[in-house]
Image (cartoon, helix red, strand yellow):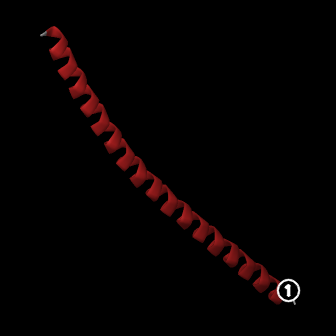
Amino acid sequence: MALINDDRALIERLVKLSQTHDLLKQNVDKAEKLAREGAVASDGYQKQVKTLEARNMGMVVKQVA
């Protein structure tokens, strides 16, 4: 009977370990997706900043002239 209980406990631990592994894998996938989206957003923001800086310089040049 003790052997059966030990086997049951081992199986329960293995199931919990598997569930934890799946959860961690999902978290990694989500983190990678967020990192990619963040990089794309950062690139877009940097392009907007460059565009605005160029416009600002153009206006400064016009005002000086």
* Residue that mark 1 sits on: 2
Q: Position of residue 22 (x, y in %)?
A: 59, 71
Q: Secondary structure at mark 1?
A: helix
Pick out the residue farthest to the right: 1
Residue ID at (57%, 64%):
24
Foreground of the two, 14 or 19: 19
Foreground of the two, 14 or 23: 23
Q: How many marks?
A: 1
Q: Position of residue 27 (x, y in %)?
A: 55, 60
Vertical position of residue 47 compared to residue 2: above or below: above
Q: Position of residue 55 (x, y in %)?
A: 23, 26
The three-letter code of the residue at mark 1 reads Ala
* Crowding near the residue tagged with mark 1, few <14, some 14–19, many ≥20 C-alpha atoms within 10 Å: few
Residue ID at (15%, 16%):
61
Taking the image as shown, residue 21 lies to the left or right of residue 46, namely: right
Quarter occupied by the C terminus: top left
Vertical position of residue 19 compared to residue 11: above or below: above
